[in-house]
Image (cartoon, coloured by chain):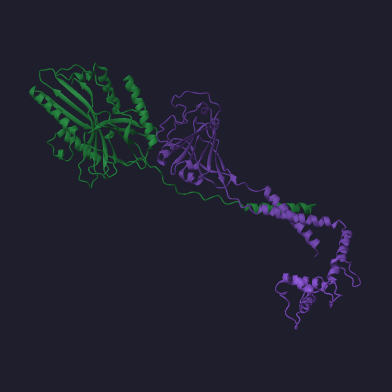
Chain colours: A green, B purple
Amino acid sequence: MSHRILRVAGVTGVAALALAGCVADVPAPVTSAPPLEASGSLLDAQSSRIIDETMAELGAADDERDTGLMTDRVGGDVITIRGAEYTLANADDGPAPTVLPDEMQAVYVSAADTWPRTMATVSVQPSDDDTPIVMLWVQEGIDDDYQLREWAHMIPGATLPAMPGPSTGAAQLGLEDSSITPTAQEAIEQYVELLLAGEGSDLNDAFAPDTYRERLFAARETYVDAANEADGDYVEKVQPDLDASFAMATADGGALVFAPLSITSSFTVEGATVSIADEDEPLLDGELDDAVTHTYRDFIVIHVPAADGDALPGVVAAEHNLIKVSDS
Amino acid sequence: MSLRTTALVAGVIGVLLLAAGLIADAQRPPRDVTPTASVDTAVVVYEPEMIAFAADNRIGFSGDGAIVGLTARPADAEAWLAEHDATYVTGVPDWETLSTDVAEPAPSPSPTVSPSASASPSEPEPSPSPSASEGESAEEAEPVDLLAEGSQDHWRQDWRGSGRLSIVASEVPAGEVLVVVSQDGTPLTSADLALTRDVQDGWITPLIWWGAFLTAVGVIALVLRFIDLRPAQAKGEKWIADRQRVGEDDEPTPGSRRARRAAGEHLPEATLEDEDSAPAPSAESSPRRAATAASAASVAAASAPSSSAPSASSVSSTEDAANTDADADDHPGPDGEEERS
């Protein structure tokens, strides 16, 4: 009996040992991560979802003309500017808010691994009289939604440079990144200096012509002449907002620089009462006497070409937004 | 060693082989295995290396509520995971288990476990989470939608399930991180990975068949050992002997084949040419003509009144026929003339 048990046990053991050697080893682990198929921060589906949600939120606010409905997807200067537009639109025969198309002809996404990040788009042409609109979204952190912060109509005749596609994304450049010349911060500061100095400045030849500064200079000349006639004074201040400025690399090694500007124009006369245009009346805060100050929140997009090119930096999109009129 | 002994030995070997084969078949390791790991966090992470390792296999997760699988760029996933407790699946050390590594968020308090989370609609907690038993304060924690509390802009793809979520690893884009989240914040219970391994068991089935064959041989030999076959064997041997025995004194049965053989029927017919006579009319070249000539000769012999061979037997040889024919030619008669016409 015991021999039989031993025999069975032996056969079982041999079979078990044989089977133990029949199973292949666990495959070796993969030690290196495969390359990312799309390294841009946003795929088309993601950017489309962001745009759709933004336009839905903006549309809801436009319908109610209530900036309080701008919560997640719309922020920054858009709330301020849209608030002024709602104020103007609520007046009799007031202009309608700027039409921001929800259909885009180009979307530029960032390739950054850090924050803040930007996404820029170029809309289709809103109407025959308007040029396409460049819009800027900003994401401050991983837990924050991309927010529409700025928009600007393209300068007539301007062209935007080629940008990297969503599969790679555009490098998010720091304002002092020296890979472009001038740097983004230098471009902003030099352009602001040009705006302050006027077309007689040496910097006027450092930037390609654009209608934005031409109109600004023309308006300034009008105000200055009026002030001189009334023994008054006209002071215009232009300040960049570097904290809200961003730069994205173009495909050819240049950059698109997005820069909001704050402009105040103060007009003062002696012994008289100033008046303003009727369409600006709804934005007046206070009662006009001998001084008036117009406050603008502008947004410009400067194209800094690649260093090895002969092209000049130039403003390719700009928006001049009156947001406030005060009596001092 | 006799044939029967050899068969018995083969039968014993066959029994052993059959037993080994059946035992091996019963213990045959499965090809499809599912290494598993227990999980105690609401977030489980597969990094790109593990996704590449899983290849076309299926990744599974189990939990109590809604489970969402999401992918993101590594940098984005890392930033999001920095604020959440997460279990990273790091490898497959053996065919039974997954190795894991639990990572806790940075020292800053995580909003996921803070009772002062945003005022999402409070729902009755279906069951206390395992971590709630550690302290009374934890019992006050309410389910928090881990995804709704922050932006979802960085998530690229998503899969959703309830209680169980299964994803084919190859559907996760290369290089992206797979983050699986229990949406209400309760810990997931397990993570598994279905794998198919190579088992070299092709020898088991032949072993069983050979064992069965040899066993059958042995059984047959064993059965024959207990059956007395001598009467049947003797009968057969007698039959064979009868078939082979031929006595010299035995006369063949008239008309049998043996009798015909004895009479020389099997011998071939041969024609001997007469040197003095003309060649036989082509008996060698044409058997049909030879037969015709023989027939004509016999007719001539029968009609000739002075035949020289009246006692010719009924069995006449070709030679006789030829000679008769020749005689007929030498002595033509009226019948011969008539026969020619």
Q: Is B132 in front, or is A46?
A: A46
Q: Is residue B239 above or below residue B176?
A: below
In percent of width and height, residue A106 lies at 31, 36
Q: Quadrant of the N terminus of chain B?
A: bottom right
Q: In the image shown, does B109 or B45 lie closer to the viewer?
A: B45
Number of dots carrying numbers: 0
- Extreme right residue here? B249
Task: State left or right for residue A42 relative to residue B41.
Answer: left
Q: Tell me where residue A91 appears, x and y as whole percent.
A: 25, 17
Query: Left of A77 or right of it: where is B313?
Result: right
Q: Position of residue A147 (x, y in %)?
A: 34, 30
Look at 51% across and 23% down and name the residue there: B123
Residue drawn at (12%, 28%) of the image = A221
Q: Is residue B273 left or right of residue A240?
A: right
Depth order, front residue of A129/B85? A129
Whether residue B89 is situated above or below residue B269 in the rendered picture: above
Res. B267 visible in picture: no
Specify the quadrant that holds the C terminus of chain B.
bottom right
Quarter holding residue A152: top left
Q: Nearer the viewer, residue B158 or B75?
A: B158
Residue depicted at x 68% and y 50%: B24
Q: Which quadrant holds residue B220?
A: bottom right
Q: Quadrant of residue A132?
A: top left
In the current view of this chain or complex, which residue is farthest to the front? B334
- Where is residue A171 drawn, in percent x and y? 32, 42
**Could you tell me if residue B340 is visible in this image?**
yes
